[in-house]
Image (cartoon, grey):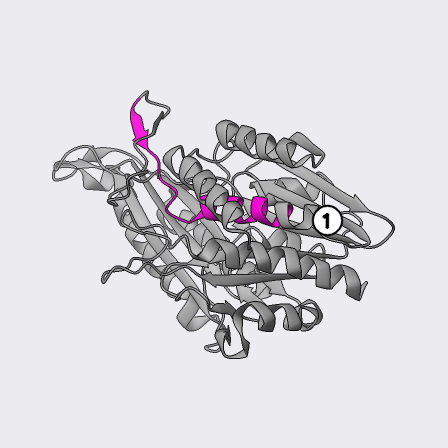
Amino acid sequence: MDPELIKRLIAIRRKIHANPEIGYREHQTAALVCEELGRLKIPFRQGIAGTGVVATLEKGDGPVIALRADMDALPILEETKLDFKSTKTMKDARGLDVPLMHACGHDVHTTMLLGAAALLKDSDFKGKVKFIFQPSEEGVYDDPDKKSGGQRMVEAGELDGVRAALGLHVHPLLPVGKLAFKLGQALACANFFKIEITGKMAHAAVAPHLGIDAILVASNLIQSVSAITAKYIPPHEPTVISFTKISGGVAPNVIADKVVIEGTVRALDLDTFNQVLSRMEKIIKGTMTSFDADIKIEYNLNYPSLLNDKQVHAQMTSTLDGIFGKGNVIPIDAILGSEDFAFYSRKVPSMFYFLGAKDTAEACYFLHDSKVVFNEDCIPYGAELLSQGALNLLKAG
């Protein structure tokens, strides 16, 4: 890749990194993307699926290939020593400052897609490439229907008529120059749930029998739901239920009348995932009857598993070998992380790759860590993968 283009891309990445924005609020990031697309003279549309940007590069008749990057950051206080580290905050619902950080590498993803656009601008092909700069991959945030940016993009029709889609994710523990993938179900179904238990307040010593102990109900519910994976799910189906937050109670001598518990469900198989949720709801109904408590469950995020298509990957083989070398394209096991590129993969044949972005420091950190650093040497690899991959898929028809 042209050294001047690499230099420009690194500058773009650092600007985005220093100015992270939460899901559905990526106004500054989207404006920068539009500015760069305008400079490349590639037509684009703004405000898609919220703050998303979709650009289209068309050269004659042929298939349509979609390339996707996500733009949102996370509510994390950055603890790296980078000169361009984030010091940005946002106001939460209480008016408090919440720190923001690109701890999942979406700043790098956005930059690499802009790099792919620059490379394809001067490439010879027949067909159409759609560059999808997507908002809100990390969650649903303020969306009234609790939908992520990926789900919104698909529902907006941006994948209609698309032959295949490509996405990638930087991997901060995989060395630069290596690429990992899993065919079939590669990433898990996922949801975030909130369970609200309403009991009845009473004196904890004199008259506990007059109350309905929401803490006792919560503890029974947690134990029963936690047993689902061991007793109702086949051992060969990777499944996790984790309770991650609990709050309730008012005083040591008062029976708690309200408890809120939160957590996540992950499963690699969609049918298994739905089976877990169904079993959870049965347990909740039974617990309500047993304790005379009122229990409500709310799902704040709901992603299907991500499907990688073997035919798309096969058509990418020459591209991957040319960029990375045969020994550096590594098949891996599926993981219980989630990605809303899953919505793309269930709409059109797709491939989603993990791109090596390991830092050169002795201590390296994983995604969503306040100290994670992504090696910028990965940017040319990602831009080449997306651009050359699109060209290969266009030729394959």
- In this view, the residue in front, 219 or 208, is 219
On screen, 346 above or below 101? below
Q: Is residue 143 left or right of residue 229?
A: right
Q: Is residue 129 left or right of residue 134?
A: right
On screen, 284 above or below 32? below
Amino acid under disc 1: Val
Can residue 51 be seen in the rendering of this structure? no
- In this view, the residue in front, 339 or 259, is 339
**Which residue is painted at 72% across and 59% down in the image?**
391
Residue 163: x, y in percent?
Answer: 77, 57
Figure label count: 1
- In this view, the residue in front, 316 or 245, is 316
Residue 200: x, y in percent?
Answer: 30, 35
Indicate yes or no whether the magenta region holds residue 76. Answer: no
Q: Residue furthest top?
A: 95
**Which residue is painted at 15% across and 34% down in the image?**
251
**Which residue is painted at 44% across and 34% down in the image?**
22
Report which residue position mark 1 lands on. Answer: 129
Residue 24: x, y in percent?
Answer: 52, 32
Residue 355: x, y in percent?
Answer: 48, 61
State which region is magenta.
96-117
Q: Secondary structure at mark 1?
A: strand
On screen, 369 above or below 94? below
Is the C terminus in the top left, top right, bottom left or bottom right quadrant? bottom right
On screen, 246 above or below 363? above
